[in-house]
Image (cartoon, rainbow, N blue to C red):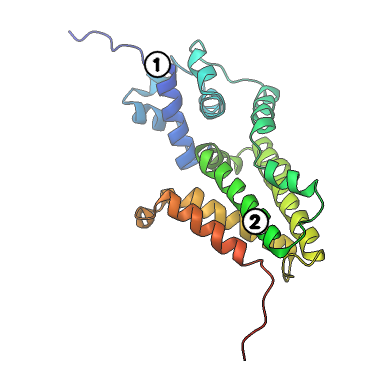
Amino acid sequence: MRGRLPARPLGEVADAAVHVFATKGYRPAGISDVAKALGLSHGAVYTYADSKQALLYLALLRVLDPDAAGALTPPVAAPSPERVTDLLRDWAATRSGFEPVAELLARPPAASAAAAETELARVVDGVYGFVDGNRTVLRLFARCSADLPELAQWYYVDTRRGLLDLIGRYLSVRIEAGLLRPVPDVPVAARFIIETVAWFAMHRHGDPDSAMLSDEDCRRTVRDLVTASFLPRGPVAG
């Protein structure tokens, strides 16, 4: 007779939940999907988490504070909404991606176009590094927020929109100082920066036709082309 299978580490269950929710989103995903990813029966998952909400909490905790996820005692129960909000805010307080832009806005505009180019390259590189370093977290947020209003409010309104506004203010100040070229619409220009970075730093990893692009080549090329698109135009040779 077969003996009982050894218990899985809670971190392994959390990793499976991360994969399922980041791939399917919250509403379409089911406990059976996590069970399949682990090679367990549907009922066996309940020995680790008592509900789908608890599995999502385990997934969030795994990407935000990995050690804390493994230290929980199963079966994990779904926390209060306030606990989830506190978890997100604590994480964002130290990893927002805002720092390079906020630091530059606190200073007077650069003294020359060359210095402004260096500044903007630093902004693009800083945002790229943040997205690249946190792409699993951000993908999980984006996939699940459509079904969870509290997560959508935090991710899109409080966090993502805040970064877009900050980059828009940076562009406006430098454009008014004559250091960057005028653009038809500053909010669209800020979104152009964010979405270009997001595709190369995060979304291309899910594109099977982009596997040949190296991380370093993508980062250098995005920094170069995005920065160049805002530099003042020189006289056209006639």
Element class at badge 1: loop
Element class at badge 2: helix
Q: Name, please, the residue furthest toward the left.
A: 1
Please give the residue where the numbered disc 2 appears in the rendered image: 118
Q: Give percent across and percent down for residue 208.
A: 36, 53
In the displayed structure, would residue 173 be above or below residue 182?
Answer: above
Residue toward you, 199 or 101: 101
Disc 1 crowd, CA 10 A, few/some/many (<14, 14-19, 20+): few
**Based on the displayed image, in which of its 4 quarters is residue 168 positioned?**
bottom right
Q: Residue at x 41, y 20 (%)?
A: 45
Is residue 224 found left or right of 173 in the rendered image?
Answer: left
Q: Amino acid at mark 2?
A: Thr
In the displayed structure, would residue 131 be above or below residue 176?
Answer: above
Q: Give percent across and percent down for residue 202.
A: 50, 48
Is residue 119 found left or right of 52 in the rendered image?
Answer: right
Whether residue 201 is visible, yes or no, is yes
Q: Give percent across and percent down for residue 195.
A: 59, 56
**Based on the displayed image, in which of its 4 quarters is residue 130 positioned?**
top right
Quadrant of the frame with the N terminus: top left
Please give the residue where the numbered disc 1 appears in the rendered image: 9
In the displayed structure, would residue 57 be above or below residue 96?
Answer: above
Residue toward you, 107 or 12: 107
Residue toward you, 31 or 235: 235
Mark 1 vs mark 2, foreground winner is: 2
Q: Give percent across and percent down for residue 167.
A: 71, 53
The CA span between labels 1 and 2 is 47 Å
